[in-house]
Amino acid sequence: MKQKSFFYVLVVLLILTVISAVISNLELGNTTEIIMILAAIKFLIVAFYFMELREAHVLWKALLIGCLTLFTGLVIII
């Protein structure tokens, strides 16, 4: 793992966390969808970078993205 790319990924994760915290404090009504999408993006970043899933078989990548999409979609619908 390169230190420079590690720092960039960490900064992106922190920025996404701050954005989701700011959105949750806004009184715009139902912001659950936006927060869930940001959480899904953060999950994918962690899975592909820190768990080194980017080097895994295509099947595992598809299963992860499919399950995440299904779970996020169900939570947003409910």
Image (cartoon, rainbow, N blue to C red):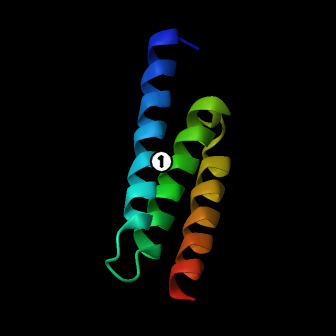
| Image height of 47 relative to 64, above or below | above
State the SS at label 1.
helix
Could you tell me residue 33's position as x and y percent?
44, 74
Determine the residue positioned at 62% across, 72% down. Answer: 71
Determine the residue positioned at 50% across, 29% down. Answer: 10
| Image height of 10 relative to 31, above or below | above
Res 11 → quadrant: top left
Left of 13 or right of it: where is 58?
right
- Quarter in which the N terminus is drawn: top right
Q: Residues within 10 Å of mark 1 (few under 14, many from 20)?
A: some
Res 27 → quadrant: bottom left
Q: Nearer the viewer, residue 60 or 10?
A: 10
Determine the residue positioned at 60% across, 63% down. Answer: 68
Q: In this view, which residue lies farthest toward the bottom? A: 78
| Image height of 11 relative to 71, above or below | above
| Image height of 77 relative to 49, above or below | below
- Quarter in which the C terminus is drawn: bottom right
Could you tell me residue 37's position as x and y percent?
45, 63
Res 48 → quadrant: top right
Could you tell me residue 42's position as x and y percent?
52, 48
Left of 53 or right of it: where is 41?
left
Residue on which the image places disc 1:
17
Determine the residue positioned at 53% across, 11% down. Answer: 2
Q: In this view, which residue lies farthest toward the top? A: 3
The count of marks equals: 1
Q: In this view, which residue lies farthest toward the left? A: 28
User: As shown in the figure, which amino acid type bears the numbered disc 1?
Assistant: Thr
Q: Nearer the viewer, residue 67 or 41?
A: 41
